[in-house]
Amino acid sequence: MNIVNMIRGDFPLFLPAVITTIIFLLAWLPSSIAKHGQLGVKYLLGNRSKEYSLSGWGGRVERAHENWKSYFPGFIMAVSLLSIKGKVEPSHVNACWLYLFARISHMTFYGMGIPKLRFISFIISFSSVIYLLLQVLK
């Protein structure tokens, strides 16, 4: 099985899962930029043994990333179990894309300090994972 076949249909959850993982792995960048601005290069290159607290948008994007780290394993587990089960439907693929866009929105709204939209985007992403996990049990 090659990557093209995986994307075309042998594993339809492959593309949204890979893109979500790539963005998840890069989600540390905004808080690192804030750390650079607020704590300096010396802190970033050091052992980081001191406690710190980022203020403003930096603190918010750091908390958003921590939140994503808490819920990402559930998403990957749901995608993996659905794939192992072999009963992937278009609604599952749509739920994966919805999860991705909701997580990006959550981090954006969290960083911008818009709590109502942040909460809505979190609920959408969380609901997507719950939907996928319920489909595993079906």
Image (cartoon, helix red, strand yellow):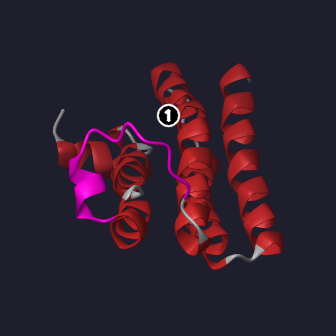
Q: Quadrant of the N terminus?
A: top left
Q: Is residue 101 visible?
A: no
Q: Label 1 sits on what residue type? A: Ile
Residue 47 in magenta stretch = yes
Q: Position of residue 134 (x, y in %)?
A: 75, 30
Q: Is residue 125 visible?
A: yes
Q: What residue is at 36 percent from the left and 69 percent from the top?
A: 33
Instruction: Please count the marks in the image.
Output: 1
| Chief secondary structure of the magenta portion | loop
In the drawing, does residue 16 fall left or right of residue 124? Answer: left
Q: What residue is at 68 percent from the left and 53 percent from the top?
A: 125
Residue 41, quarter of the rendered image: bottom left
Q: Classify 84 as above or below 116.
A: above
Kindly identify which residue carries mark 1: 76
Q: What residue is at 36 percent from the left and 51 percent from the top?
A: 15
Residue 130 in magenta stretch = no
Residue 105, quarter of the rendered image: bottom right
Q: Position of residue 81 (x, y in %)?
A: 53, 23
Q: Position of residue 122 (x, y in %)?
A: 72, 56
Magenta part of the protein: which range?
Answer: 40-53
Q: Residue furthest right?
A: 116
Front in this rendered view, residue 15 or 51: 51
In the drawing, does residue 72 fall left or right of residue 28? Answer: right
In the drawing, does residue 41 fall left or right of residue 90? Answer: left
